[in-house]
Amino acid sequence: MDEDKIRAGEALDVATAMLIEEGYAGLSFRKVAAGAGMGIGNLQHYFPTKADLIRALLDRLFTRFDASMMARRTTDGGPAAELDAAVDYALLDQTSRESCVLLWEIWALAARDPHANDLLIEFYDKYVGYISQTIKRVRPEITPERARCAATLAAALIEGVSLFRGPGRAPKLAPNGFDEALRKALMRILDEA
């Protein structure tokens, strides 16, 4: 890996931690640069604007998601097993502060910042596209539109449920049996696509 990628990755690590701990209001180029041990000019070489920094954070989050899903494609059992593994991953990922809190913060920002909103749309377009492709491999007989619709419903359910299951949430918000009920609801969406 070249030096620029390493340095940019270090800055993304700092920015991610800062967003999770301090929120978008606490995110500043000065703090990110200091945390990554570089000057502001160097940071802006990698990420000219805050929007570029947020885009890079979302791209990295999606890349990690995609890598995890690609690893699951090699499992035995075909597309149905891949889909089941994707649901397992979604449930596990909801315990990750990096995924949940980072997205919650960007959701809040997107409500008032058009650039953040555009970045979130771009992120979810890729995310839903991935789920849609997986559904089409499991159910090749359905149209791309039906697969996309089912993928959008599944993504909305998974993301919404993160508010109840995510890090720091009270166990009473996701009582015993909740995960199994969620899995059944997701599979029903996919089965009825």
Image: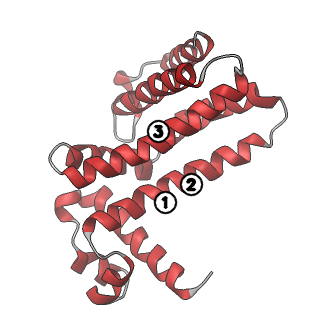
| Rendered location of residue 116, percent (x, y) | 26, 52
Amino acid type at circle 2 is Arg
Q: Residue at x 59, y 17 (%)?
A: 190
Disc 2 target residue: 64
Q: Is residue 96 above or below residue 86?
A: below
Which mark, residue 94? 3
Disc 1 target residue: 60
- Relative to 177, is 82 on the left or the right? right
Looking at the rendered image, the quarter that the N terminus falls into is bottom right
Foreground disc of the pair 2, 3: 2
- Relative to 140, is 56 on the left or the right? left
Looking at the rendered image, the quarter that the C terminus falls into is top right
Q: Residue at x 63, y 34 (%)?
A: 133
Q: Is residue 45 above or below residue 110?
A: below
Amino acid type at circle 1 is Arg
10 Å crowding of disc 3: few (<14), some (14-19), many (20+): many
Q: Which comes sooner in the sequence, label 2 or label 3? A: 2
CB under 8 Å between discs 2 and 1: yes
| Rendered location of residue 72, percent (x, y) | 72, 42
Q: How far is the residue under mark 2 from the one under mark 3?
A: 14 Å
Foreground disc of the pair 3, 1: 1
Q: Is residue 183 above or below residue 35?
A: above
